Every structure is written in C-alpha cells, then in structure tokens.
C-alpha cells in the first residue's frame, strides 16, 4: 500500500523523447511567432496569420495528455523571446501566452476526447472533429479570452467585438493551415522515398511548380487590370485540386500552406488583389478567401484518401481470404500429399536397404547394379523434392504475380498436385488438351487454386460411386477468342435451383468444407477478366468451365533484317 | 526359390522391392497393374504377392476380391502409401495376410512375406 502511494506521489519521470519534443516545440514556436510577425499588415499592426497557437495545438494532438504541461511550458521561453523584442508590455505578453495556451489546450482536449490517441487527419470523422473543435471552437472560445485580456490591459485601441472577430479569423486560418500540415508530416518516414517511383516525384514537382507560378501571378504581382482580378483567385485552384486528388492529405496540406504563405506574403508587400483596402479589410478578405479554399480541399483530400485506403484494405482482406481458402484446401489434400511423398520415400528406403544387403552378401559386389540403385535413389529424391516445391508455391502468401501462362501447363501441374488424391480416391483423370492453345495472362498459383478446387469438388461429387467408375475429364479449347478450361465429373451433379447457392460464401455440402471454394474461385477468375460457371444434368455429373481472355501480345513485329 | 509377385503401378517401387527381395534370396516378378497380374497368376501361381492398394484402374482391394471370387487363395501382403483405418479391415477381411504402410522397413516386409507363405494351421475342431 505504502509502496503504491509512493509511486503515485513521485513526480513522473520525463522521457528523453518528451524533452526532444519540448525542444522542437520551443524552436518551432519561436520561428512561428517570427513568421506571424512578418505577416503583420502595416501601418496598424494586424496579424493575418498567427501560427504559434496552431503549432502548439498540433504538438498537443500528437503527444500523450500527460506530457501536455511539458510542451506548454516549453513554449513560454520562446514566446517571451519573440514577443519582448516587439516592445509589447510584459503584462500583455504574458496575457497572450495564456490565451495562446488556452486555444491549444481547448482544441486538443476536445479533439482528444472524441478521437483518442495521436490525431491523424485521415478519415472524414477525425477531419470533421478537428475542423469543428480544433479549427472552429478552440479559436472562437480563446478569442473571447484574448480580446478580454487586451481590453483589460489596455493594449491597442480596438473595441472588444472587433478584437474578437480579428483574433478569431486569424486563428482559424492558422489552425486550418498549420495543424493538418504538421499532423500529416509527423507520420512521414524517409523510407517512403524508397518505395516512391520516379514518376511520382515528377508529378509532385509539377503540382508544386504550377501552384507556385499560379499563386505568384495571382497574388504576388501588381494588378494590371482590375477587371481580371476576380478571375485570378481561381488560378491556383486547378493545382490545388490536382494535389487533393493525387497527392493525399499530406500533399494537399502542403499545397494549401504554400498558397496561404504566397497570398499573405503578396498582401503584406502591397501586391495582389487583397492589397487595395485598409489593413483590416485586407486581413478579413484574405482570411475568408483562404478559409473558404482550405476547408473543402482538405475534406476532399481526406475523403479520397479514406476511399483509397478502404479499397486497399478490402484488397488485402481478399488476398488473405484467398490464401486462407487455399491453405484449407491443401489441408483436404493432405492424405494425397502423404501418398505422393511416401511413394518416393519407399523407393529410396527399399533401394538403400537392398544395397545394404548386396554389400553385406557373400558374393561379388555388382557395381553396375549398385550404380543403378544410386541413380534410382536420386530420381526418387528429386521427385519428392518436386512434390514439396509444388506445395510450397501453393502455401505462399503474397500479391498476385501476373505472367503469361500456358493453360495446358496449368492443367498438367494441377493433375500432378492432385495425383495422390486422385489415386487414393480411385478417380481416373482424363485430359483432352487442345494442341495449339494461346497463352493467358494470370497468377499461376491463383489459377491453379481454382482448378484444384474444381478437381476436388469433382472428386467429392463422385465419392459415393463404385470405384472404377469415377471419371474426371479436363478439356482445354479456344472458344470465341477465349481459352476455356472445362472440368467434368460423372457424379451426382447439382440441381438448377441450387446453382447460384454454389457460388455463395459459406455454402457447402461437405462435412469438412469451409464453403469458400467456389465463391473465391469465381472472384479469382473475375479478377483475371474471365468467367466461371457450371452446367449439370442431375444424376449425370457436372461440368465447370473457366473462360479466360487470351493474352494480347500486341502486333507481332518482324525480326530486324540482318 | 520362392517366387514373389510385386504389383505396384510405380516402376521405381517395383524395381526397388525387386532388388530387396532378390537380395534376400527370393525371386521377384513385377506387374504394373492388377489386370496384368491376374492374367499372369492364372498361368502360374506365385508363392506370395506384394500388392499395392492404390493403383489407377483396378485397385488392390479389387484385385483381392477378384482373387477371392476366383477361389485363388494366395498369400498376400498389402502395401499402401495412404493408410486409412477402414481399408486395413477391408483388406484383411478380403483375404490379405498382412497390411503394411509405405515406406517399408526391409525386416518388416520380409517377415510378413515369410509369415504369409507359412501354411495356415488347420482350424482346430471343437
């Protein structure tokens, strides 16, 4: 009990990672404050964008709540250093520190309450929570405090509500621009660079160069013709949309930050469409414009990223399910596999033991016979190795690997894999393979999985028949410009009313079956651009057909003349 | 020299078992399927049969049943690479003297063959 209490009372040990974060916050806060001061419109100082608060909120959103006090404390020296240089009274400097911290704290606490853990702006839900509470509620609430402190201390000359409005829009823009940027880049790892193909860098370069040029033309050059000014607002839009559609949240947040910096930079230097009015009007117009651009683009990027992630996850799951059903099928094949391995093992053992007897015998050793024995042992060993090799390929899990395949090869390979099962179940396989069959494009393992599944189903359908009458036929043909592989059994067949059920997941007529075979087989064949269907006359067996598109080798070019 | 028939669809196994039996002083003849063996056995009865269970076409069990139906009571040792409890019973009840799993230990096989060739003790009358 005492030990526990002592543990509770002991001040928490600060991890090195927190100290690094605190240092990063202090440096970042100082630089952000300098940037904010640089974005101040003159002659009446009005900040258009005040990034330190947003930086602080982003830091809190990434850190565990128990370290928030460390990060907020780290901002104080940076705040004092930046603000005291600008000749603001100490009371006001401290007041602003309090209101800046309050904004970050309110936003981070509300968002954390609704989205636990470090925030990632990668789903519509987390993005909405951030926009509503981090970018709207927090700036709004802290603006009241900020304006109250300014009025109380008597710094500046605006009335209370004007101050609230100015603080609010400046902070909203900062939250919108800075927080998603930091959150998106916080999860970035240099390893990403290795997996990025060169054309992606070209695209990223094109987006940002185009965006930079469009923004400079629209916002950082003197306005030549007042009538074309409204149209200039739209100049960066194509590049921003490009970023949202193709570059994800990280790319969009970066693109938006670039536009914000260039737009405000232009206005501060008296350039672009916003420079015409009073500093107050300029700031308001600028902020409203940038907020109106940022919110929909950010949401668009998040929605698209969420969609593509969901598609990727579904793909991953389908791949896992395909592998799972393949492994389950191999489990069903295990008896036949044991047979296939026991045969060469028998040849190896009996040959070796025969050789032992020859060597131990009294007569003269027949070297020719011994050499024959060793040769047969090697052959049998290689055969066992080939069995294992074929199985290893089927057990492997991974992405589909498309390659040109000879359908007849696939049939032969499948019959080799199923050989043990066919023999032990007294099923007689017959093949009728078309001589000149075009190649198909596909994943060898997945196509073999489908055919193996159909072969196993055919065997199961003939289980109750007398041995010697169980016949399986595999036929390959070119029909209507497509390769067709047909697997026919002479078993019980299926009724027409059961047909669609056959392809439904978890529908099975086998006691040990998962019921995934045909449903996964069909999805594999569909993914190969083909079709899988069955025909049957009940009592007279069934045929399942796989139709696959022929590999298009393109126009055949004549070999170069020599 | 006792003559042993080896019925197995795999040539590699017929050869290996043939060598083993010859090394043990037996005469061995290989047959690639049941039909080939039945035809030969009708001409000349082997002293013992080593019969594989799983063969394409006629299975070992069918061979056993055909022999039984023909009244040809040969000493038979069934060998299999795919062991199932029910097939052992089926084979033994269809006239097999022994049922061995592949791969085959030489001693086990040779013992089974010599045991199978020993004449069955006449049933004792009560």
Image (tube, coloured by chain):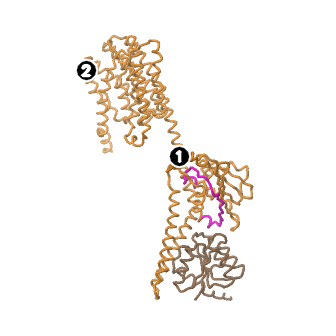
Chain colours: A orange, B brown
Q: Is residue A457 above or below residue A3?
A: below
Give the residue at the far front of this rendering: A562
Query: Residue A509, how many percent across, how many down?
Result: 66, 55
Question: In the figure, residue B29 lies in which quadrant?
Answer: bottom right
The stretch drawn in magenta includes residue A538: no
The image shows residue A460, relative to residue A503, as above or below, that is below
Secondary structure state at the residue bearing disc 2: helix
Upstream in the sequence, badge 2 or badge 1?
Answer: 2
Which chain is indicated by disc 1?
Answer: A
Residue found 59% across the figure and 76% down from its top: B99
Helix, strand, or loop for circle 1?
helix
Q: Nearer the viewer, residue A13 or B55?
A: B55
Is residue B56 in sight in this rendering? yes
Q: CA distance from mark 2 to mark 1?
A: 57 Å
Direction from residue A467 to residue A105 in the image, left or right: left
* Lateral position of residue A276 relative to residue B65, left or right: left
Q: Tag 2: Cα neighbours inside 10 Å, few (<14), some, or many (≥20)?
A: few
Q: Which residues are magenta?
A: A420-448
Check if residue A428 falls in the magenta segment: yes
Which chain does the residue under circle 2 lie in?
A
- The disc placed on residue A411 is none
Judge if badges 2 and 1 mark residues of a common chain.
yes
Image depth: mark 2 or mark 1 in front = 1
**Residue A172 place in picture, x, y as percent:** 41, 22
Is residue A109 in sight in this rendering? no
The residue identified by callout 2 is A84
Q: Which mark is residue A317?
A: 1
Residue A128 position in % (x across, y down): 48, 29
Q: Quadrant of the N terminus of chain A?
A: top left
Disc 2 + disc 1, Cβ < 8 Å = no
């Amino acid at each position: 009990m005492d030990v526990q209490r002592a543990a509770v009372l002991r001040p928490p040990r600060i991890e090195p990672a927190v100290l690094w974060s605190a240092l990063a916050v202090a440096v970042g806060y100082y630089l952000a404050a300098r940037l904010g001061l640089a974005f101040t419109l003159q002659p009446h100082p009005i900040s258009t964008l005040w990034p330190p608060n947003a930086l602080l909120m982003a830091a809190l959103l990434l850190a565990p709540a128990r370290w928030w006090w460390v990060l907020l404390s780290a901002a104080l020296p940076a705040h004092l250093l930046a603000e005291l240089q600008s000749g603001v009274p100490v009371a006001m400097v401290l007041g602003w520190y309090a209101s800046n911290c309050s904004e970050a704290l309110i936003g981070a606490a509300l968002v954390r309450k609704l989205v636990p853990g470090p925030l990632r702006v990668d789903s519509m839900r987390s993005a909405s929570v951030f926009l509503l509470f981090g970018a709207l509620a927090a700036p709004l609430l802290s603006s009241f405090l900020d304006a109250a402190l300014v009025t109380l201390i008597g710094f500046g000359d605006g009335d209370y509500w004007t101050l609230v409005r100015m603080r609010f829009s400046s902070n909203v823009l900062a939250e919108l621009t800075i927080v998603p940027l930091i959150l998106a880049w916080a999860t970035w790892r240099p390893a990403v660079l290795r997996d990025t193909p060169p054309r992606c860098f070209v695209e990223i370069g094109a987006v940002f160069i185009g965006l930079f040029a469009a923004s400079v033309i629209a916002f950082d050059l003197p306005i030549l013709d007042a009538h074309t000014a409204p149209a200039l607002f739209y100049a960066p839009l194509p590049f921003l949309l490009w970023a949202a559609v193709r570059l994800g949240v990280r790319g969009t947040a970066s693109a938006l930050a670039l536009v914000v910096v260039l737009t405000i930079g232009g206005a501060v230097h008296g350039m672009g469409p916003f420079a015409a009015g009073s500093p107050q009007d300029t700031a308001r117009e600028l902020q409203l414009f940038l907020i109106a651009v940022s919110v929909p683009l950010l949401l668009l990027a998040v929605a698209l990223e969420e969609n593509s992630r969901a598609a990727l996850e579904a793909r991953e799951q389908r791949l896992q399910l395909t592998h799972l059903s393949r492994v389950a099928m191999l489990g069903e094949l295990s008896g036949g596999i044991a047979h296939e391995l026991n045969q060469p093992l028998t040849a190896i053992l009996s040959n070796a033991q025969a050789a032992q007897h020859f060597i131990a015998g009294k007569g003269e050793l027949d070297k020719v016979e011994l050499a024959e024995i060793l040769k047969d042992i090697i052959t049998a060993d290689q055969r066992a190795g080939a069995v294992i090799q074929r199985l290893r390929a089927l057990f492997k899990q991974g992405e589909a690997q498309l390659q040109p395949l000879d359908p007849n090869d696939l049939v032969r390979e499948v019959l080799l894999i199923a050989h043990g099962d066919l023999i032990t179940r007294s099923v007689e396989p017959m093949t009728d393979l078309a001589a000149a069959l075009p190649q198909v494009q596909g994943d060898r393992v997945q196509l073999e999985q489908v055919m193996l599944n159909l072969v196993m189903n055919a065997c199961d359908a003939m289980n109750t028949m007398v041995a010697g009458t169980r016949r399986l036929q595999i036929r390959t043909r070119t029909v209507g410009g497509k390769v067709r592989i047909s697997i026919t059994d002479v078993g019980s067949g299926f009724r027409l009313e059961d047909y669609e059920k056959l392809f439904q997941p978890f529908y099975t007529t086998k006691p040990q079956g998962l019921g995934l075979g045909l449903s996964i087989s069909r999805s594999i064949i569909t993914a190969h651009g083909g079709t899988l269907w069955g025909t049957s006359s009940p009592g007279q067996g069934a045929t399942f057909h796989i139709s696959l598109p022929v590999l298009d080798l393109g126009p055949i070019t004549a070999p170069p003349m020599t | 020299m006792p003559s042993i028939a080896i019925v197995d669809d795999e040539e590699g196994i017929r050869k290996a078992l043939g060598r083993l039996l010859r090394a043990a002083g037996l005469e061995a003849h290989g047959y690639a399927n049941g039909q080939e063996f039945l035809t030969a056995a009708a001409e000349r009865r082997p002293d013992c049969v080593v019969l594989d269970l799983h063969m394409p076409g006629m299975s070992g069990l069918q061979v056993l049943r055909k022999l039984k139906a023909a009244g040809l009571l040969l000493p038979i040792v069934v060998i299999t690479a795919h062991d199932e409890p029910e097939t052992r019973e089926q084979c033994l009840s269809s006239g097999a003297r022994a049922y061995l799993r592949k791969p085959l230990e030489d001693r086990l096989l040779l013992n089974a063959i010599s045991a199978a060739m020993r004449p069955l003790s006449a049933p004792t009358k009560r």
